[in-house]
Image: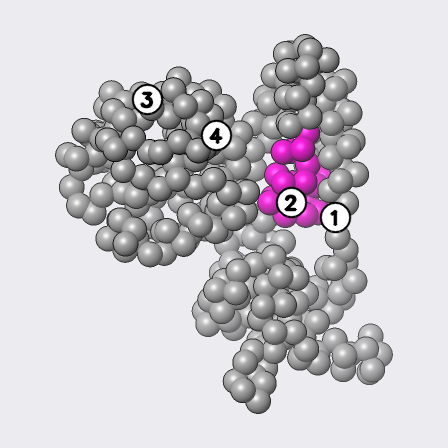
Amino acid sequence: MNATYDQNFHTPVYTIKAISRLADLPAVTLRAWERRYGLPRPQRGEQGYRLYSEYDLYTVRWLKAQIEKGLTISRAAEFLSSLRISGNDPVISQPSTASVKYNSKKAAQKFYQYLLKMDSLKAGDLLEKAYEETSAEEIFDGIISPALKETGEAWHLGELPVVVEHHASQLIMQKLHRWTGQVGRVRQDALIMAACAPNEHHQIGILMLVLLLRLRGWDARFFGTDLAMDGIGYTLNLLQPRLVLLSATMPENAENLTGLFKDLEAVPEPKPVIVLGGSGFRNKPIPEALPGIIIDLPIRQAVDRIEEILNHSGTGKEK
């Protein structure tokens, strides 16, 4: 790295809003990392605003990549510090690789073709490679969701047998369970219970949320499909979750959740926040007997919203 390039690489030019957009991380997360771990290390402008360099941007992207591979932010920060001490700063040695944008559109087209042929090996390898090279959010939004939408539409039009759609769903669920199991120890003590409503068996969407929440450090656990209301009060009393995340793709399955209210009344304060998601709640009011918050957002915005609720629910209920 020559002197001119090195100077430009460390010149503070980005605002926190720009870094947040380029790194795809909330500004509140950037400030928290700076406060807790000293990473990144922005300079201050004349008005006191944070200003970041290219080096800071690549540092943030490198940290984010380690978290998406299963490290907690504290372990990732320690890892980076040890590499820098040993003279092997990955941000300096490989700055150009940090800004390469993953071609999710091309990957999605290949993935869909593999699914049509029910080629588990190639489809699985493609997802694993994508998981190493880009973010989980990009995989969901750019590869999995488009492929599922296409297979679903083709099935409804009679162009594909249902076995192809089932094969695709099973493959994706296996990967989601695998990646979730690989996530290291969570750093939050607030439990998130996630499950599908009674009679609900579509689980890919909620599995995505669970994985992303765990990657961000939350203790999110999936309790399966077709949640039985019998004994739910016992589970809530025993585990005392901060938040209960429930999904339903059909309105009738959403209505099946009303049985949760009686058991929720018996749960001592602070009661968990109930978050509802899925097309079963779309354009439909929540039954009065089921207090909850509906989230109908794209995957990464949904996770941001859930985090916002958790961070403002010190008493277990959103104000």
Q: Give the CA separation, mark 4 to mark 3.
A: 14 Å
Residue 279 in the image: above or below residue 317: above
- Front disc: 1 or 4: 4
User: How dense is the environment of label 3, judged by Cα within 10 Å: few (below 14), some, or many (20 and up)?
Assistant: some
Residue 25 is situated, as x and y percent measured from the top left of the image, at 56, 59
Query: In the rendered structure, does residue 135 fall within the stretch colored magenta?
Result: yes
* Element class at badge 2: helix
Residue pointed to by mark 4: 279
Q: Give the CA separation, mark 1 to mark 3.
A: 41 Å
Q: Would residue 84 be visible to someone looking at this image?
A: no
Quadrant in the rendering for residue 54: bottom right
Query: In the rendered structure, does residue 239 fall within the stretch colored magenta?
Result: no
Q: Earlier in the sequence, mark 2 or mark 3?
A: 2
Amino acid type assigned to the residue bearing label 2 in the image: Glu
Q: Give the CA separation, mark 1 to mark 4.
A: 29 Å
Quadrant containing the C terminus is bottom left
Residue 242 is situated, as x and y percent measured from the top left of the image, at 30, 45
In the foreground, 235 or 89:
235
Residue pointed to by mark 1: 102
Amino acid type assigned to the residue bearing label 4 in the image: Ser
Asked if the residues shown at circle 1 and circle 2 are in contact, with their CB atoms under 8 angstroms apart, the answer is yes
* Element class at badge 3: helix
Q: Earlier in the sequence, mark 4 or mark 3?
A: 3
Which span of residues is magenta-colored?
129-147
Q: Give the CA separation, mark 1 to mark 2.
A: 9 Å
Residue 150 in the image: above or below residue 179: above
Residue drawn at (68%, 36%) of the image: 143
